[in-house]
Amino acid sequence: MITAENLSYGFPQKDLYENIAFTLEEGRHCALIGSNGTGKTTLAELIRRPEEFLFDGKLQREDVGRIGYVTQFASRDKMQSVGVTDYLMDDFRAIDEEIAHLCAQMETAEELEPLLERYQQLLDEQAAMDAEHCDINIRRQLQLAELEDKAELPLALLSGGEYKLLQVIRQMLRRPGLLIMDEPDVFLDFENLNGLRDLINAYQGTLLVVTHSRYLLHHCFDQIWHLENGDLQEFDGSFRAYQFALLQRKVELQEQAAMEAAEIQRVEALVERLRDEATEVIDPLRGRVLKGKATYLKRLQARQIKPPFVDIQRPAIGLPVPAEAAEDDVLLQVEDYGLAFEKPLLSHVSFTIRAGEKVAIVGPNGTGKTSLLREIRQGSHPAIRYGDAAKTGFFSQLQEEALEEEHTIVEEFYDAGLETRTEVAAYLTQYCFASDGLERKIAQLSGGEKNLLQLAKLALGEKNLLLLDEPSSHLDTFAQMALEEAIASYEGAVLMVSHDFYTIANCMDRVLLVEQGTIRPMSIRAFRKMIYKHHFDKEYLTLETQKKELETRIARCLAKGATEEAGALLRELEPIVDALA
């Protein structure tokens, strides 16, 4: 269906792909993953509209037909008053209206052939979309997404996550030859994420989805494309199976490296012995043997495998040095806070953040979490009070608030207090920004790269209370894990709005759960149990725990070079991965 050979493409300041190849067959559900800035969105766009790109190599799209597309961002300003069902019916009605218009034209037209050709195209499109059963199909899709109770509501009353699901449903109803979705999971709450999972798994067409969602990666997709370091690796199978294959490859490479190191050690000893002998006895034959062994040793050393064995970029995210505060200092006090727009959203909200605490605000889309965090940042509401020791930093999900789009990367960090290009380059290396790309404008960066820059700016200076609004959004899976480790080890306090269950579970101390118009405090253990009870079965939780423990033990074995022990643990891990697939 889609094939590429020796495909190369890049920008003036950055090469993205070099001689990559891939195949996407009909009916496959493929996830496109990779580090931030590797060109995933660009590759999706290149497949979608190859005529707009000057690339080298071959790209073929056979019998694809129309390509559907769901973007990261969607605007609904023009359709606020339209009802959900009417919105989903819009494409079907548009075809009906064009057919009626063509029929009217044919009554008086002198040249019928082009009109008949278009008429047949529209009939074929109706058949492909199963237009005869569109009402039933719309109800089925809404039910899958758990939006059946929203069918008659106007779009204006939907949350951002619910509207995003409608974008997916609308494209799926059109049944394109290929549906491309670029991070459709961004900012979805957990309920909506479940709806997206069910829509993907029930879809019978061909899918290519750019995603960093660990939840979707673990529960959807039968093919993985991994884009990294200018190359693309294909894997037929689930994401868990792919992770296992990578881990297996690490063990194999370390075994190979150990054998090569042993051989190098043996040859080094032999060369040293031959040298000693050559100083005692002048013998041309021994000299030639010595020269040959020395050459062999150089070849061994040149090809020796060095860590990291599987070279995946992972930023070393840092957080700021905490400003001084006593352990029990109150940094933030919210007391009887209320929030309303056209209708009340939150009322009687009260909580305290003390030095060193890590707290997540969790709840469905549209319940006022981000608005609350913004008012906390502003600090002007009478129900919100900062402690005397509080020094805050803010991460915004609206990237244009924190970054100047027309600045280059270097200019952005001059404004942040760094003084020389060398200083900026050295600092941003840990965030996986290459020195030769620092003249790129912020506007040219991917969403994940922008968020990494936000985190890099946030880490400068002294702060002891970080206000984070969806900090893991757009970050690749490796950067998400790096962020979790940074938050977990941070000695200051964090108040974070997030929909990412993994980020919350891995680094937060407690949760403020938004429900029924107010906030209920909850321990992180109770939050985990609630999520697993509603969205996973007990066996899944047990297997996931075993898998994580074994992966941790394997990583420790690899770190200390205990390859045989790592291989034995890998054999224990394999049936667990199979059971989770």
Image (cartoon, rainbow, N blue to C red):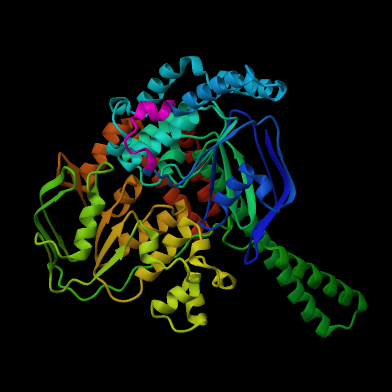
Q: Is residue 542 visible?
A: no
Q: Quadrant of residue 161?
A: top left
Q: Residue at x 39, y 52 (%)?
A: 473
Task: Give the vertical position of 452 relative to 90 (above or below).
Answer: below
In the picture as drawn, the residue positioned furthest to the top comes out as 132
Residue 60, x across and y down, in percent: 72, 39
Task: Give the vertical position of 25 relative to 327 (above or below).
Answer: above
Please check the rendered image and state whether residue 320 is part of the magenta-colored stretch, yes or no: no
Residue 78, x across and y down, in percent: 38, 41
Check the picture and name the quadrant holding the N terminus. top right
Q: Quadrant of residue 283?
A: bottom right
In the picture as drawn, the residue positioned furthest to the right comes out as 284
Q: Residue at x 58, y 62 (%)?
A: 307
Report the side of 485 relative to 111 (left or right): left
Q: Nearer the viewer, residue 269 or 479?
A: 479
Q: Main secondary structure of the magenta part?
A: helix
Residue 95, x across and y down, in percent: 53, 24
Q: Nearer the viewer, residue 238 or 48?
A: 48
Which segment is the magenta one?
78-89
Q: Residue at x 44, y 28 (%)?
A: 90
Report the side of 449 relative to 373 (left or right): right
